[in-house]
């Protein structure tokens, strides 16, 4: 309750960090965004839902490029901490849970965003980790894809008619994810 008067300012600051900063700071900002929406400060937060969804859409649109960049000869040798948030598998891994929360709290954003999210999420699921992608990044990519798949199963429950055209694609991608998920990535396999 004591945070309530600062919630909007904190959310705006966290969104600025999330959309413009590097991976490490953006991870903290992502959790702050989730927590602030989760704390039921809804009336003042609604105007910040679409900017978060736009960030997720942008990250998904750039995912193919991110994989290609990280697979390039010099892409895997980036300085630790130099990954921009929009190109971070870790950040994108956190996003589906926040999107699910936002859709539950602010259902008016569902119809306008699902048609844009679904094709991009299907493309993300279909991505295969190139052999020259550094092992750590390959693990992060698979974890990201698993979280996206988890979000899609949430959508199946509420939007079966929208999802029915993707059922074959989803099934094939589940098999591919199980094959590509490292054996020792126990939390991702769950």
Image (cartoon, helix red, strand yellow):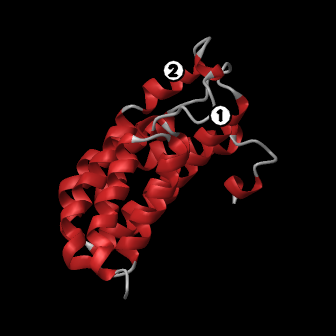
Residue closer to the observer: 50 or 35: 35
Residue at image mark 2:
68
Q: Position of residue 46 (x, y in %)?
A: 21, 69
Q: Position of residue 52 (x, y in %)?
A: 31, 54
Q: Position of residue 106 (x, y in %)?
A: 24, 71
Residue at image mark 1:
138
> Hey, which residue is sitting farthest right in the picture?
184
Which quadrant is the N terminus positioned in?
A: bottom left
Tell me the residue at 70%/35% (across/down).
136
Secondary-structure class at tag 1: helix
Indicate whether 175 appears above or below 47: above
Point out which mark residue 184 bears.
none
> Hey, which residue is sitting farthest top in the picture?
73
Q: Is residue 149 visible?
A: no
Precedes in sequence: disc 1 or disc 2:
2
Residue closer to the observer: 55 or 82: 82
Using residue 179 as the reference point, say whether residue 53 is left or right of it: left
Using residue 121 as the reference point, say whether residue 12 is left or right of it: left
Q: Is residue 5 visible?
A: yes
Q: Position of residue 180 (x, y in %)?
A: 68, 37
Tell me the residue at 80%/45% (across/down).
183
Within 10 Å of the Cα at label 2, are there few (<14), some (14-19), or many (20+) other Cα atoms? some
Tell me the residue at 52%/42% (across/down).
23
């Amino acid at each position: 309750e004591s945070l309530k008067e600062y919630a909007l300012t904190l959310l705006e600051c966290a969104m600025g960090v999330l959309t413009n900063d590097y991976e490490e700071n953006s991870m903290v900002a992502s959790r702050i965004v989730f927590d602030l929406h989760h704390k039921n400060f809804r009336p003042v937060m609604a105007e910040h839902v679409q900017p978060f969804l736009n960030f997720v859409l942008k990250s998904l649109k750039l995912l193919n490029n991110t994989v290609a960049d990280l697979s390039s000869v010099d892409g895997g040798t980036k300085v630790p901490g130099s990954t921009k948030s929009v190109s971070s598998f870790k950040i994108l891994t956190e996003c589906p849970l926040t999107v699910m929360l936002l859709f539950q709290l602010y259902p008016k954003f569902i119809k306008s965003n699902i048609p844009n999210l679904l094709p991009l999420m299907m493309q993300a699921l279909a991505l295969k980790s190139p052999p020259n992608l550094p092992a750590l990044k390959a693990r992060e990519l698979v974890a990201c894809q698993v979280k996206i798949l988890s979000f899609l199963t949430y959508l199946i429950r509420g939007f079966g008619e929208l999802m029915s055209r993707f059922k074959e694609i989803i099934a094939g991608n589940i098999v591919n994810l199980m094959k590509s998920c490292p054996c020792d990535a126990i939390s991702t396999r769950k």
